[in-house]
Amino acid sequence: MTLSQDLVRRLPKAELHVHLDGCLRPQTMLDLALEQGVRLPATDAAGLADALFVRHAQSLEEYLERYTITISVMQTPAALERIAYEFVQDAAADNIRYVEVRYCPALHDSDMSLIQAVEAPLAGFQRGERETGTMVRVIVSGLRTLAPKISEGLARLAVDYRTDGVVAFDLAGSELGHPATDHVAAFEYARGHGLACTCHAGEGDGPDSIRDALHVCGAQRIGHGTRLFEDPDLEDEVLSQGVPLEVCLTSNVHTHTVLEIGEHPARRYLDQGGVVTLNTDSRLMDRTTLSQEYWLAHQALGLTRAELEMVILNGFRSAFLPDTEKAALVAQIERELREVR
């Protein structure tokens, strides 16, 4: 069957790597800026979307600068709840059935407590889930550029809410010069209390970053992992052991991790039996949707429908959910995939 963008959009999907502060609606940002007295780089939705769209960043660090703009309007509980609710609406519109969304509560505590910074978006996510049927779980992210003690506090916060929708701890932010090993205590606390862990690695730094995430921090998934191929031994280990890779094609071009989509190593990892998942990273800064990322994988990397379905199922099977719940979800998605024509 010939693939079309509409068919790809209709396929049920899971997303495991997406940042809440990279997915705001521009009009919502304008509304919140007016309420909070924040000055934005544009006064209309189209201009703001263009200002936040990253096209020519030369590094991960330059790409991340845009997040200071979105975070500036995410400083009240009401704002966080609204943004979270709209996030789910937008995910459901893209036929995403399960999503793990991540953010760093420590960046949203200027006028609220860390507890409020967790409970407000959780309320928005849960309301969106009830209305749309899209399952939402939360990953609490520490940042490499913040003090390790802050990461420990965030890991404790994540554990405290593990029965309320938080499923994992993550470490994000600038990799170069900020090793994950500095934050190992946070990972140990999370894992020691039954919380799953993922970690951004192999995006802004080389394969040693991936090795630290796996061997020192105990991450069960790797966020991006783009530069894994630079160390063949580590590549063989990761792919043969089935460590899921949270691949973000468009974002990797925008962060200058790869120069062109056609050069992205996701195709290589998939051909070698790796557990590749597709994700957006940031809908706003990358001006993309998950359906567009799947279509891009088909067009630029040559993934067939069977391969796209394999990647879809990789996403659901790699979810940080209890085994029985995950198995039921995978079985449901397998049935739905057979029905989409």
Image (cartoon, helix red, strand yellow):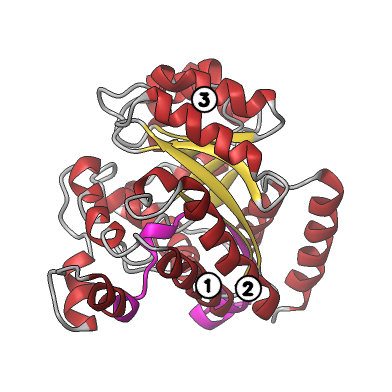
Question: In which image quadrant can residue 127 be found?
Answer: bottom right
Place of residue 84 in the rendered image (x, y in percent of width and height, measured from the top left): 50, 67
Residues under numbered marks 2 and 1 in contact, where contact means CB atoms less than 8 Å apart:
yes
The residue that disc 1 covers is 85
Place of residue 197 in the rendered image (x, y in percent of width and height, measured from the top left): 59, 34
- The stretch of residues the image draws in magenta is 1-28
Q: Earlier in the sequence, mark 1 or mark 3?
A: 1
Q: Identify which amino acid the numbered label 1 is placed on.
A: Tyr
Q: How crowded is mark 2: few (under 14 residues within 10 Å), some or many (20 or more)?
A: some
Label ID, residue 118: none
**Residue 17 can be seen, yes or no:** no
Q: Which of marks 2 and 1 is nearer the N terminus?
A: 1
The residue that disc 3 covers is 186
Q: Is residue 91 above or below residue 46?
A: above
Alpha-carbon distance for marks 2 and 3? 30 Å
Q: Is residue 152 above or below residue 97?
A: above
Q: Nearer the viewer, residue 192 or 238?
A: 192
**Residue 47 can be seen, yes or no:** yes
The residue that disc 2 covers is 127
Q: Identify which amino acid the numbered label 2 is placed on.
A: Arg
Place of residue 3 in the rendered image (x, y in percent of width and height, measured from the top left): 55, 75
Whether residue 151 appears in magenta in the rendering, the answer is: no
Q: Is residue 205 above or below residue 122?
A: above
Alpha-carbon distance for marks 2 and 1? 7 Å
Kind of element beneath mark 2 = helix
